[in-house]
Amino acid sequence: MKWEENVRRVTPYTPGEQPQKNGVIKLNTNENPYPPAPGVARAAAAMDVEKLRLYPAFPEKTELAKELAAYYHIGADQIFIGVGSDDVLAMAFMTFFQSDRPVFFPDITYSFYDVWADVYKIPYERKPLDGDFQIRTEDYRQKNGGVIFPNPNAPTGILMPLDRVEEIVSANRDVVVIVDEAYIDFGGTSALPLIEKYDNLLVVQTFSKSRSMAGMRIGYAMGQPKLISCLNDVKYAVNSYTMNMTALELGVEAVRDTVYFEECCNKIKETRAQAERELTRLGFVFPKSYANFIFASHKSVPAREIFERLKENDIYVRWWDKKRIDNYLRITIGTKEQMEALYRALSQICGKT
């Protein structure tokens, strides 16, 4: 058909499976196993639905922006809010990566980066991680059109120390460097303090993981006011009303309840430590994780076999048929009860008792 000649062709991002049947143990999409803060439920119940006939306020003018600014001790003009961190990152690609030079990101990383680059026709280069799945900072000292990487990395869970993050930022002062911190609340040190020193640094975080609000789609970027202003200019040229009123109001309660937030993060870290012990006992090896998942390979049983047999037991983990990582499983940290069910199934699959 003639019209197909003008269609933009890209290979889309492939998310983890979303099983629709009841009773499954879902450890494949890094969702938080605990509910949002209690105040979120109260605010949802008290919402005036009459307001939904109105357009929402611009995100940077809302109470959510003020709460985030107060929480992180920065100005409201240093925050950009979007529909999940995916929307924020896509907008950042569109805004900052306009050079003829390639954008750099790791070869084993969040697999949406090359999708956005293809959609927006941005040249890019994947920089290989070393044999221990570590970023080699020297690879990011060449001329480029921008840099992006997650910290902790996904799907490995490996954390880059802050001094090495700064090494990459300082070596690329003529382009924007984006640090994607979707998992930073599970044990890492944020690069946020560096935004006062570097006007080319954008730090992106999300409500989807540590704040248990993946279904609300709230993400945000933090940087110097000029960077945020550039993002807003592009956003409002595309869609002025990107955030819905419900997300903007409920997000406030998630930020305010710091006690609940810290309790949930600590429970996941404690369960992760137990998972490390159990998986080691079962014959798995894995890098130290600072995320809400573990990237594990078994010493003798192929990852694909484990993946398929777990599915037969209604337990879902993530597996990729990709070079270098096709013998690894990414296992989200669930509740204690979910993880115990996982260990029982793995004991049978891996021949351990």
Image (cartoon, rainbow, N blue to C red):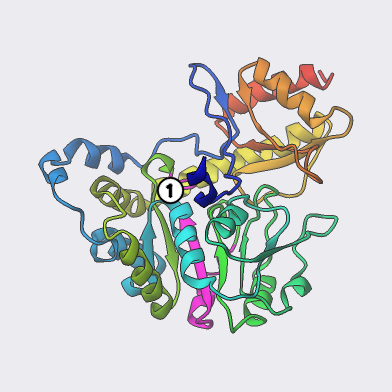
Residue at 84% across, 31% down: 283
Measuring 79% from the left and 19% from the top, which residue is drawn there? 349
Going 17% across and 39% down the picture, which residue do you hit? 46
Relative to residue 45, is residue 9 depicted above or below? below
For residue 351: magenta? Answer: no
Q: Is 223 above or below relative to 347?
A: below
On the rendered structure, is 152 left or right of 5?
A: right
Residue topped by disc 1: 261
Tell me if I can see residue 74 in this picture: no
Judge left or right: residue 57 versus residue 298.
left
The quarter of the rendered structure image containing the C terminus is top right
Residue 206: percent from left, percent from top: 46, 53
Q: Residue at x 14, y 49 (%)?
A: 54
Q: Does residue 304 lie above or below 56 as drawn?
A: above
Q: Quadrant of residue 49?
A: top left
Residue ranking furthest to the right: 300
Q: Amino acid at mark 1?
A: Phe
Residue that protrudes farthest toward the front in the picture: 2
**Left or right for 149, reference 320:** left
Question: Does the magenta portion include 207?
Answer: yes
Q: Choose between 296 and 309: the one closer to the eye.
A: 309
Visible residue check, residue 322: yes
Q: Which class describes the residues within 10 Å of circle 1: few (<14), some (14-19), or many (20+)?
A: some
Q: Is residue 97 above or below residue 22?
A: below
Q: Position of residue 50 (x, y in %)?
A: 10, 41
- Nearest the camera: 117 or 198? 117
**Span shown in magenta:** 189-211
Closer to us: 61 or 197: 61
The quadrant where residue 256 appears: bottom left
In the image, taking residue 161 as reference, residue 21 lies left or right, namely left
Q: In x, y percent, where is residue 191? A: 56, 69
